[in-house]
Image (tube, grey):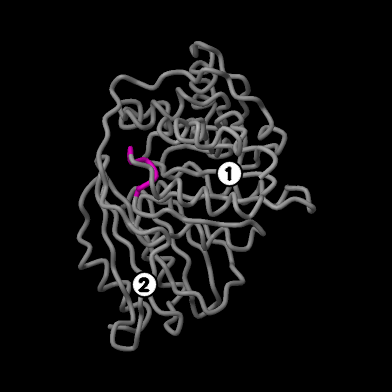
Amino acid sequence: MSHQVPTNIITGFLGVGKTTTILNLLKAKPENENWAVLVNEFGEVGIDGAMMAEGGALIKEVPGGCMCCTAGVPMSVGINVLLRQKPDRLIIEPTGLGHPKQVMKTLTSEQYTNYIDLKATIALVDPRNLSDERHLSNANFIDQLSVAEVVVGNKVDQCSAEDIDVFNDWLTDQSPAKIFHKLVKNGNLPIEVLDIERRIPNQTTSQAQSHEFHDHSDLEPVFELSPELPFVRRENKGQGHFSCGWIVGAEHSFDFDQLFSMLSDLNAERVKAVVNTDKGCYAFNVANRVVSVNQMSLEGYESRVEVIDSELLPWDQLESVLLELCGLR
């Protein structure tokens, strides 16, 4: 490569709208540019890559929380694969349960000096979470905001005036001040924000940061489905959270209405799914028990469901319900 690729880290806690924001940025990118996205998910089955498949970008996934591990080998492998495609821009989405500091350290290491031009790190935050002690006491949440030069308050349409005041007061208290901030809805981030230069050196992360190793998944693992084994299930745990994901063969279709109802009632911190239904292929996104749905044009794609919560949920019971909804029980 003869030039450095402009690169942004887009971070934020679970359910804040990172994937939606990246999808909007992909829609706004210049037509003559090829962008690449490296996606890290805490879950094992990989949902975001499917959601971004229609965005016209090169996509690589690092499932299982690996990108926040100190070794960072899966991340480096994914970056190298994407850089070989000579993209015009690289966007990296770490898991919402990860610390971005190690990602920054890798991207600014000697290994990538000649290949990556790391721009400002962008942190998304739901302003309502700045009044939630569960978030304010979480080292990941604190560090994601502290290392970012750009902070975007997303989901402003769901916030009260008091939430906005808390967000603005928080910004006023930041030292050094954030380079840029904005309140948006539906992840509609101005594309120009990607070109804001990084502040060097980056702010240090919280001393409370602790690291937990996850079981390493292979980069983009292949799941073998067959008539004898029409679905697979994978679990992960770490950073005080648990996840369980299912992949169901493309030949099986879920009942849309019953699935929507089940996801609306499911008391989990985070749910993502890309599912074949009797009404077509849809992406389901659940945060704060609010379900959003977008139709997809994917064909022949396995259905994928991922559930994350800070409590260990009854996975066997949930699995029985899911399999019943697609006719496997």
Q: Which quadrant is home to the C terminus?
A: bottom left
Span highlighted in magenta in the image: 65-70
Q: Position of residue 63 (x, y in %)?
A: 39, 55
Mark 2, secondary structure of its residue: loop
In this rendering, would 156 be left or right of 268? right
On screen, 255 above or below 88?
below
Let me know if residue 66 is in the magenta part: yes
Name the disc covering residue 91, or none.
Answer: 1
Work out whether residue 97 or residue 129 is closer to the camera in this orientation and state it. Answer: 97
Name the disc covering residue 65, or none.
Answer: none
Which of the two labelled residues, at mark 2 and mark 1, occupies the earlier sequence position? 1
Q: Who's the residue at 61% across and 44% down the image?
A: 90
Q: Position of residue 47 (x, y in %)?
A: 45, 60
Work out whether residue 282 or residue 179 is closer to the camera in this orientation and state it. Answer: 179
Q: Which residue is mark 2?
A: 223
Q: Position of residue 91 (x, y in %)?
A: 58, 44
Q: Who's the residue at 42% across and 32% down the image?
A: 129
Work out whether residue 61 or residue 170 is closer to the camera in this orientation and state it. Answer: 61
Contact flag, marks 2 and 1 (Cβ < 8 Å): no
Judge the density around disc 2: few (<14), some (14-19), many (≥20) Cα neighbours within 10 Å.
few
Which kind of residue does numbered mark 1 sit on? Ile
Mark 1, secondary structure of its residue: strand
On screen, 15 above or below 249?
above
Q: How many marks?
A: 2
Q: Who's the residue at 58% across and 39% down the image?
A: 157
On screen, 57 above or below 298?
above
| Marks 2/1: CA–CA distance | 26 Å
Which kind of residue does numbered mark 2 sit on? Phe
Work out whether residue 116 or residue 222 is closer to the camera in this orientation and state it. Answer: 116
Let me know if residue 189 is in the magenta part: no
Judge the density around disc 1: few (<14), some (14-19), many (≥20) Cα neighbours within 10 Å.
many
Q: Position of residue 65 (x, y in %)?
A: 35, 48
